[in-house]
Image: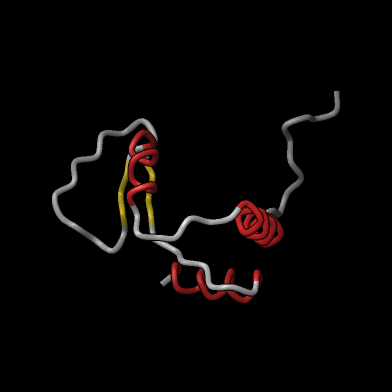
């Protein structure tokens, strides 16, 4: 599973256990939950209520920064284009 791979990658990269939950977010869609699954399916608006209720421990600001850095290094394969030169 991708969640297992990501958990193992982040745990090794930051040097402490990182919990990972599979989530699919569909912004702008209506999602009707029919049953429970290993993968949470949410609308963009449901994220604000779903994650605070999860059983995961709160992440420190430092751990969030480390995780973001590792994901940025692993996933960014193009230069940011927010401020393209004119």
Q: How many numbered discs, if any?
A: 0
Residue sitting at x 58%, y 55% = 60
Q: What residue occupies the far right of the structure in this picture?
A: 86
Query: 80 and 61: which one is in front?
Result: 61
Q: Residue 25's x, y, as percent? A: 38, 44
Q: Residue 58's x, y, as percent? A: 48, 55
Residue sitting at x 23%, y 60% = 37
Q: Quadrant of residue 27?
A: top left
For the rendered model, the colour scheme is secondary structure
Q: Quadrant of the C terminus?
A: top right
Q: Is residue 39 above or below residue 48?
A: below
Q: Residue 69's x, y, as percent? A: 69, 56
Q: Quadrant of residue 70?
A: bottom right
Residue sitting at x 39%, y 36% = 44
Query: 47 and 25: which one is in front?
Result: 47
Q: Quadrant of the N terminus?
A: bottom left
32 relative position to 49: left or right: left
Query: 12 and 84: which one is in front?
Result: 12
58 relative position to 47: left or right: right
Residue sitting at x 19%, y 58% = 36
Q: Quadrant of residue 26?
A: top left
Q: What residue occupies the far top of the structure in this picture?
A: 86
């Amino acid at each position: 599973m991708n969640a297992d791979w990501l958990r193992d990658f982040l745990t090794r990269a930051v040097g402490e256990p990182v919990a990972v939950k599979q989530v699919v977010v569909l912004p702008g869609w209506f999602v009707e939950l029919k049953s429970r699954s290993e993968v949470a399916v949410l609308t963009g608006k449901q994220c604000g209520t779903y994650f605070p209720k999860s059983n995961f421990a709160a992440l420190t600001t430092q751990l969030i920064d480390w995780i973001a850095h590792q994901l940025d290094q692993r996933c960014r394969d193009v230069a940011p284009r927010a401020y393209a030169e004119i």
